[in-house]
């Protein structure tokens, strides 16, 4: 098979494998066609005020400072004398959009919203705002529009500041919250003289939503333990006090206003969020006003955490909820229908109302969730053959009717406690049934994907054996091949017909039909399989078992490193001892010593804290100075090799790269100093940063393609943007990694000479761009599996060595401050990805050099790498789970996604590495085209 066709086919196959996990685990939970359900009794409140303090942690709000003073005195007073309080438990991903959707719509959003930056509406959904008579909202342009766009009719009004105000480098981020409070006051002041507006805001079923982003912005910029973050909490506390007083005065203290304060997510100590750490998932919930219970004093209460004692709140009853439970609470307070897609359970302990009202409300909640269950069941029943359909046994049609009838009877008999208990049981069963039908096809799809995975990996192994080892000389039997073709075509038609009569989604056709051509390609090579089986049978059993155990151990080490970064340390220590085991140290002592020392030095990085938690700009400066020293020494060596003459254009390029390193070092220090003094991001620094980034992939193409010069040029060019994106010790990581890569190239040269396989000239005179005679390519040896394993291990080390995104929440926003400080999720994400890619590129370029050095075609080692990464991916596919904590579920899925992205990325990276190493652009003359 042509290499280009193979890569395209491989990319498509792996994209399907990657997409499959989202169809299996991340499909939208929403269904449509339900009837709105409203509590039949009059609500206690005419209006609801929702304060969402974005990024506010529960512990930071509730704790007392060193002097025993509350962080938010007004809200503390509410807890002790006027309302109910607790902790709202959020779900991963702990981001702003999913958090607000859970709060206001009552369901946990699927991952498809990532593709729209958590801003737009990837799916239509109902919300408390949509069900209200009128909603007025003030705050961020990232949050408010999605609820206005999702509303039916024109009754959700938004007032947003400009996106440019969301600046992490701003002098005072509390201005975002001050803007909201001021505009709310002005709005009500204007309403006094505007009869139409006055009439609207005096209607029933009105919601006022204040989105307060300042706390989140200050947390990202200064960390949650900073003075700025805590001062912002006090500002919010004062602002809420003012707004409550103003509203009570405006409405004449009619006692018909309910207030809720909560947060969409928390924040880690290092100023990020997104994962499942308790500091991110525990958010405050304080409710008071019309229809809300007063504080309930208790003598003792038990929670798994020790927060009550720390917060000095052990005397006041703590009422914890899931974040989605807040939506039905708001709906119940103002008497609007529960959001159609809500899976929240009404927290009755927050309600200050009659037992009858509570029973009717939870009954309405149960019917609303049961409606979703019935629609989901009907949809699944219609798309499944009757003899294959297995209904959810615990909630049959008869059981539903019996429970509803019994609950209604209890309410008529005024047995409200029994009715509430029965409704909660029905809700629990309906939610379990929703999950059952939502995951109904999971096993079926999983088997299809595994079949495709195993078939693809088997085919690649057979391709290696057939074309790169010389172990088999088999030819195809044309008659058998035609028969196989018809047989597999018939299987494909049967599968397609089966899916068609079940009206399955089009993606199901891809997952189920993909294994057919893949396994056809495998079975077609049955002669190769026979030859391979014969060779394995004559191979010594002990050596076969030893080889398999070594391979399994290597794969397990790579898999284990995804869970524990320190595993990489043990692997690198083992690598350091490799020359001693193979006795290479007797042949090349200097090379062996450098390899061992650099392995041990790199082994230190996975033991260090995750990047971003403790910024240290001085280490970035040190890295800049070290790379300048290395480039100076390299220039001296280059002059010595070239007999004191270096072409002027080559010297110019090298000096330009050194200047770029120096400028990057200066910009990092200057930017962070400016932001520390709250002077914002200097425009000149921003221009230099973007210019440096833009030139980083272009400049290496201007340098000579000799091994040493081109690899050095790639390192210098990529180090400039890496320095700009660094905040601490990680700036030193590419230096050590590159040193080890240079040593690896020399070590592989020594290995070939040790076994008498190499007649190549010295590395210093090797040129990437020389056309290699295909007759010089050798066949694969067992040792080449070790080389491929080294490459995969170094790729994993390049990713997890500094813990860049070992979890979502280790992303430090300060790392992109040299480029921008205004919130922009896609640009920020792209910069983060490029920072992660840079070590990958360095490893891939070194691997390209290893392939040239060891006289191998790039295709052969690449195929072995593909097999290793695919076995890892299959391993993680089996580790994916949908039970346990949300952190465990999210981690298992993210690991699979990561390793699949690795595999796809390695394919693309191979082409990028060839481009960076073999091509040269001549600015001082015509462009030379070199063969790859």
Image (cartoon, rainbow, N blue to C red):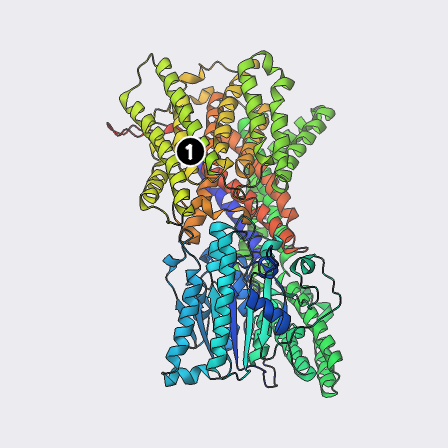
> Residue most toward the left?
925
Name the residue at 51% across, 18% down.
749
Number of callouts in the render? 1
| Quarter of the figure with residue 651 | top left
Residue at disc 1, secondary structure: helix
Residue under the image location 60 percent in, 74 percent down = 329
Residue 132 placed where, x, y %?
50, 78
Residue 24 position, x and y percent, is 59, 56
Residue 771 % position (x, y):
38, 23
Residue 593: % across, % down: 56, 18
Q: Quadrant of residue 280?
A: bottom right
Horizontal placement of 697 versus 593: left or right? left
Q: Is residue 636 above or below residue 151?
A: above
Q: Quadrant of the C terminus?
A: top left
Front residue of 920/838: it is: 838
Q: Nearer the viewer, residue 52 or 490?
A: 52
Residue sitting at the far bottom: 412
Provide the residue designation for mark 1.
719
419 horizontally vs 558: left or right: right
Q: Is residue 678 visible?
A: yes
Observer-nearest of 104 and 113? 104
- How packed is label 1: few (under 14 Cα within 10 Å), some, or many (20 or more)? many
- Can residue 525 be seen here? The reply is no
Residue 77 versus residue 62 in the image, above or below: below
Residue in view at x 62 percent, y 47 percent = 877
In the rendered structure, the answer to whether residue 158 lies left or right of residue 878 reads: left
Between 788 and 708, the one lying in front of the other is 708
């Amino acid at each position: 098979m042509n290499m280009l066709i193979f890569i395209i086919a491989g990319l498509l196959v792996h994209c399907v494998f990657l997409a499959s996990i989202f169809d299996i685990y991340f499909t939208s939970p929403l269904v449509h066609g339900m009837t709105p359900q409203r509590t039949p009794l009059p609500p206690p409140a005419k209006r609801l005020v929702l304060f969402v303090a974005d990024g506010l942690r529960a512990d930071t709000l509730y704790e007392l400072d060193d002097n025993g003073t509350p962080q938010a005195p007004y809200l503390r007073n509410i807890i002790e004398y006027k309302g109910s309080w607790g902790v709202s438990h959020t779900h991963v991903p702990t981001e702003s959009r999913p958090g607000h959707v859970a709060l206001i719509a009552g369901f946990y959003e699927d991952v498809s919203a990532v593709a729209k930056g958590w801003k737009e509406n990837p799916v239509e959904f109902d919300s408390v705002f949509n069900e209200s008579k009128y909603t007025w909202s003030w705050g961020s342009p990232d949050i408010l529009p999605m609820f206005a766009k999702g509303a039916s009719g024109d009754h959700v009004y938004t007032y947003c500041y400009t996106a440019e105000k969301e600046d992490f480098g701003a002098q005072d981020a509390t201005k975002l919250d001050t803007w909201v409070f001021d505009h709310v006051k002005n709005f009500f002041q204007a309403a006094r003289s505007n009869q139409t507006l006055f009439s609207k805001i005096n209607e029933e079923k009105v919601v006022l939503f204040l989105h307060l982003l300042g706390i989140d912005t200050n947390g990202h910029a200064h960390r949650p333990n900073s003075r700025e973050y805590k001062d912002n909490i006090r500002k919010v506390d004062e602002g809420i006090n003012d707004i409550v007083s103003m509203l009570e005065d405006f409405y004449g203290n009619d006692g018909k206003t309910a207030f809720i304060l909560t947060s969409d997510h928390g924040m880690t100590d290092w100023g990020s969020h997104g994962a499942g750490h308790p500091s991110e998932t525990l958010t405050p919930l304080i409710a008071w006003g019309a229809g809300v219970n007063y504080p309930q004093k208790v003598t003792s209460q038990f929670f798994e955490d020790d927060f009550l004692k720390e917060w000095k709140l052990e005397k006041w009853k703590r009422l914890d909820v899931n974040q989605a439970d807040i939506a039905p609470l708001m709906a119940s307070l103002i008497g609007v229908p529960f959001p159609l897609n809500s899976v929240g359970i009404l927290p009755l302990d927050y309600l200050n109302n009659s037992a009858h009202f509570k029973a009717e409300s939870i009954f309405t909640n149960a019917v609303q969730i049961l409606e979703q269950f019935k629609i989901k069941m009907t949809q699944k029943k219609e798309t499944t053959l009757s003899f294959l359909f297995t209904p959810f046994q615990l909630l049959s049609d008869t059981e539903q009717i019996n429970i509803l009838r019994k609950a209604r009877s209890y309410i008529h008999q005024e047995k409200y406690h029994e009715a509430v208990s029965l409704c909660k049981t029905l809700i629990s069963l309906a939610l379990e049934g929703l999950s059952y039908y939502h995951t109904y096809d999971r096993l079926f799809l999983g088997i299809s994907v595994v079949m495709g995975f195993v078939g693809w990996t088997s085919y690649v192994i057979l391709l290696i054996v057939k074309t790169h080892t010389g172990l088999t000389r088999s030819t195809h039997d044309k008659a058998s091949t035609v028969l196989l073709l018809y047989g597999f075509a018939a299987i494909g038609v049967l599968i397609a017909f089966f899916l068609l009569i079940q009206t399955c989604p089009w993606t199901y056709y891809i997952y189920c039909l993909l294994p057919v051509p893949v396994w056809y390609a495998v079975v077609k090579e049955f002669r190769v399989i026979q030859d391979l089986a014969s060779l394995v049978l004559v191979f010594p059993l002990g050596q076969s078992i030893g080889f398999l155990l070594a391979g399994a151990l290597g794969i397990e080490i790579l898999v284990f490193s995804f869970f524990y970064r320190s595993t990489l340390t043990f692997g690198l220590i083992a690598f350091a001892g490799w020359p001693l085991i193979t006795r290479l140290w007797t042949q090349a002592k200097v090379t062996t010593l450098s390899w061992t020392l650099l392995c041990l030095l790199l082994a230190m990085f996975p033991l260090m804290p995750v990047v971003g938690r403790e910024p240290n700009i001085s280490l970035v400066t040190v890295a800049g100075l070290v790379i300048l020293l290395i480039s100076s020494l390299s220039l001296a060596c280059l002059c010595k090799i070239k007999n004191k003459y270096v072409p002027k254009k080559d010297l110019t390029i090298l000096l330009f790269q050194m200047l770029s390193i120096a400028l990057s070092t200066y910009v990092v220090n200057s930017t962070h100093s400016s932001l520390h003094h709250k002077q914002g991001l200097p425009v000149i620094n921003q221009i230099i940063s973007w210019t440096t980034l833009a030139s980083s992939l272009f400049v290496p193409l201007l340098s000579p393609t000799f091994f040493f010069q081109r690899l050095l040029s790639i390192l210098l060019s990529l180090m400039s943007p890496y320095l700009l994106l660094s905040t601490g010790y990680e700036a030193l990581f590419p230096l050590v990694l590159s040193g080890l890569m240079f040593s690896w190239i020399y070590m592989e040269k020594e290995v070939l000479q040790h076994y008498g396989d190499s007649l190549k000239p010295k590395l210093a005179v090797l040129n990437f761009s020389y056309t290699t005679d295909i007759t010089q390519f050798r066949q694969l040896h067992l040792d080449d599996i070790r080389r491929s394993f080294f490459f995969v291990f170094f790729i994993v080390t390049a990713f997890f060595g500094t813990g860049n995104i070992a979890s979502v929440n280790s992303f430090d926003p300060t790392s992109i401050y040299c480029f921008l400080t205004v919130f922009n999720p896609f640009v920020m994400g792209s910069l983060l990805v490029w920072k992660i890619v840079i070590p990958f590129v360095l490893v891939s370029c070194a691997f390209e050099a290893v392939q040239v050095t060891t006289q191998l075609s790039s295709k052969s080692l690449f195929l072995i790498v593909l097999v290793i990464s695919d076995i890892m991916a299959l391993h993680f596919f089996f580790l994916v789970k949908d039970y346990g904590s949300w952190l465990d579920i999210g981690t298992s899925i993210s690991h699979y996604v990561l390793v699949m992205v690795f595999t796809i990325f390695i394919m693309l990276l191979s082409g990028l590495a060839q481009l960076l190493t073999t091509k040269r652009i001549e600015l001082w003359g015509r462009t030379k085209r070199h063969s790859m």
